[in-house]
Amino acid sequence: MENFSEVLALFLSVDNFLAIAAGVLVGVVVGAIPGLTATMAVALALPFTFSMEPVTAILLLVGIYKGGMYGGSITAILIRTPGSPASACTLLDGYPMAQQGKAKKALKTALYSSVVADMISNVALIFFASYLAKIALNFGPPEYFWLICFSLTIIVSVSGSSVVKGLIAAGLGIIVSTIGLDAVYGTQRLTFDNYNLMDRVSFIPLLIGLFAIPEVIEFYTSKVAPHIRTAVSGASLTWKEFKGLLKTIVRGSVIGVIIGAIPGTGATSAAFISYSEAKRTSPRKANFGKGEVEGVAAAESGNNGVAGATLIPLLSLGIPGDVITAIILGAFMIHGLTPGPVLFQENLTLVYALFCGIMVSSFVLVFVGNAAIRYFSLIADIPKTILLPIVLMFCIYGAYAVNNSTFDIGLMLAFGVLGFVFNRTGIAAAPFLIGFILGPMFEDNLRRTMLISKGDLSIFFRGPITWVFILLTVASLIFAIRRYWVARKEDALA
Amino acid sequence: MLKFVKSRVRNKFLYALTAVSLSCGGLVQADEWPEDNIRLVVPYSAGGTTDLLSRKVADLLQKELTTVVVENRPGAGSTVATGQLARGGRGSDHMLLMASPGHTIGASLYPNLRYDPVADFAFVRNVINIPNVMVVPGDSPYNTVAEFVEAARKQEMSFSSPGIGSSVHMSGELFKNLTQTQLVHVPFRGSGEALPALLSGDVDVAFENMPTVYPHIQSGKLKALAVTTPSASEFLPDVPTMQDAGKGYGLETYETSAWFGLIAHKSFPEEGMVKLQAALDKVMAGEEFTKFLPQFGAEAGTVVGDDFRQFVQGEVQKWSDVAEKANLKR
């Protein structure tokens, strides 16, 4: 009990609450602006935390992280421009909803799914950190390999009308992902001696180009008067609807937690896996991709479930799962703290004070998110003739800002044209994105596995985790093929 | 029309006059370096070790001189930003770059770079050094460098790194080279991915940066066999240096570390250099800096000016040889 009062004494300070509020607010705003990522915001905020108390400093950074995770969905829904990579999945249904005048419902769904997922993720962090950390440590290259194989099967469910077209898009994504230095030998692949391509194609320009630019081109090339979007004053999310979504949200959160606890997999994969699972089990399968509220809930709960869970390997093992947690690790070190088992032994009070703050940040997200919806929604009222040039400007700025590289602007525009061609030919862009993200992971882990085992294939079946993912992969493929045949039969009958 | 042209010409003269007078103003003030904000370019993305260290140094340096603006310009290792600095141009008299092992390793791996890592730059000073540590999993059967080398000569072993061309990778290649052992390099993307493979024993050894592995050495999950610097580290006083532990195994000259230092364009004003070095001396002697170092398992840099240049020259030579032998030249 004495400890408890110490924790409260450490946590209950005005500074901490201010840090959380400021962090979440900055995160949401930055996350919503394409090209400004939560990663950049966390990195830029870091020097300001040098002079703060350790708990305050880390809560500020965690606040930005969590806010950014949600913020990305706002522009994804409203203008089809994902503010962060993880929200690319949210726009699959969020943007069609906005076009149907249901932007408010989509935004609220995204917010509340995010908040619930965030809380579940926090609870997992607080209560199951040590178990999940053990699983994470058992994740070697062969386990990753099978996890990626399983993730690749989701291409089928985000392929839209045609699986073949989806596979083509995914293949193209994988080809683009191979540009750059080979990870094992360091040879240049498809770089054409251009040093801008040596570090692989940058992610943000690709993302913005693929999703936002086609809308702009579409607007200026179509002769038909563009669909005028109704303002956001439309219906909000009702409690009854929310209850209906709860199962999807909880499932998405759990997927997010598991993916988040494994270093290096990332929120984007979690969002897509959650989306794919929701689609597979939903009675309204056919409506996915056309403005299905469940799709938004699945995507957002998947990516926000990751936010608390990435702190699991960080706090319990000292292993950062992504770039943001790597920066937060830096913040710990600057304050003379080393995350890992030692932290729990020597600074338990501090750890629990952090947990309190992280829980509070979820509640803060509700308020900040609602305010953000109110103001960002104004975007939807702007006539397209004015809005789209502004979007284009932001796209260009965003593509440039990530690496301060003008080359990336060209890259973004090139992907914009590709995205437009995709739109016109009925090829879904999501499989391209998945191929681009998962392709390198697949290759890297396959090659790492072979290097570690010195060519012995039995390593692929070395333990329970590999078997779990092998079975999941096979099951997912069987489901996909069966669904494909059923759909074909129905088409033939119709 | 004539009137217009005349007015244009007159205007042009006026502009020229203004420009000349302004630049004269500049000349008059030339002994007052810095005349502008200092830009410190970090050739990696925000959030990495180089970024973190640079921001701290910038923060301390601006208390001594003038505002220091940190700019991240990642790309192709560190070669994009470094290439830009080498080209010089406007503003390069107030531009610094935080160079690290990537500066010399990049030059040894990619001979087609459009700059010379030594001749094209002015060398301010080496600010921070972080030793690498040779670590094996906690349950590894090897307890000394000698035992490890003996075993690695009999069977193939693997070492992990956060990526090809990193100082961690090249430290491993150097080890392999000097000891004539069979080590397979298993590259990961970043230490966050590399570390679990080492902790779980999927790879046999790594030559990781001190701050990455220090907590795991303390908790017993990793065993430190040697530090890669010529003298023992104050963080791991009981761990021998590679040069001592590897006597008789070809490691007598083994030395690597992750070094960080400020470099500038070769035309950097002499006066600025003197002022910068003085300011850095002050910063590095200060309490805030000395307190900051241990959090990164780091030590204060030692070499300044021409000594720093010679150090970098030596590094380029060393890595070039290693890259040659490991067939890494591209």
Image (tube, coloured by chain):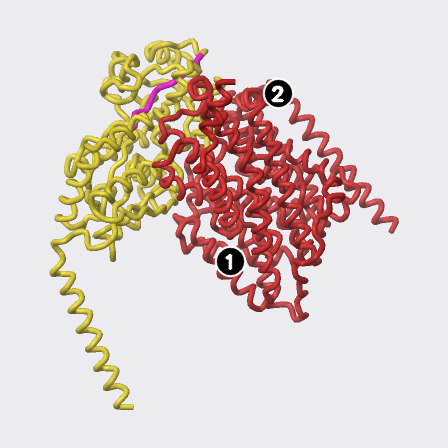
Chain colours: A red, B yellow
What is the three-letter code of the residue carrying label 2? Answer: Phe
Q: Residue at x 35, y 19 (%)?
A: B134
Residue furthest right in the image: A493
Q: Is residue A99 magenta?
A: no
Q: Is A80 left or right of A45, judged from the image as shown? A: right
Q: Secondary structure at mark 2?
A: helix
The foreground one among B309 and A103 is A103
Question: x, y (%) of residue A451?
Answer: 49, 24
Q: Are marks 1 and 2 in contact (CB under 8 Å)?
A: no
Q: Residues within 10 Å of mark 1 (few under 14, many from 20)?
A: many
The residue pinned by badge 2 equals: A461
Q: Secondary structure at mark 1?
A: helix
Q: Residue at x 13, y 44 (%)?
A: B274
Picture quadrant where residue A306 is located:
top right
Q: Is residue B136 magenta?
A: yes
The foreground one among B278 and A452 is B278
Q: What's the magenta region?
A: B130-138
What is the three-letter code of the residue carrying label 1? Answer: Leu
Do discs 1 and 2 belong to a common subunit? yes
User: Magenta span: helix, strand or loop, mainly?
Assistant: strand
The chain letter for the residue carrying disc 2 is A
The residue pinned by badge 1 equals: A413
Q: Is A15 left or right of B1, judged from the image as shown? A: right
Question: x, y (%) of residue B326?
Answer: 35, 28
Q: Is A66 left or right of A222, judged from the image as shown? A: left
Q: Residues within 10 Å of mark 2 (few under 14, many from 20)?
A: some
Q: Residue at x 68, y 33 (%)?
A: A251
The chain letter for the residue carrying disc 1 is A
Q: What is the CA distance from the residue labelled 1 to the residue labelled 2?
A: 44 Å
Of the numbered discs 1 and 2, the one sitting upstream in the chain is: 1
Tell me: residue B319, above or below residue A27: above
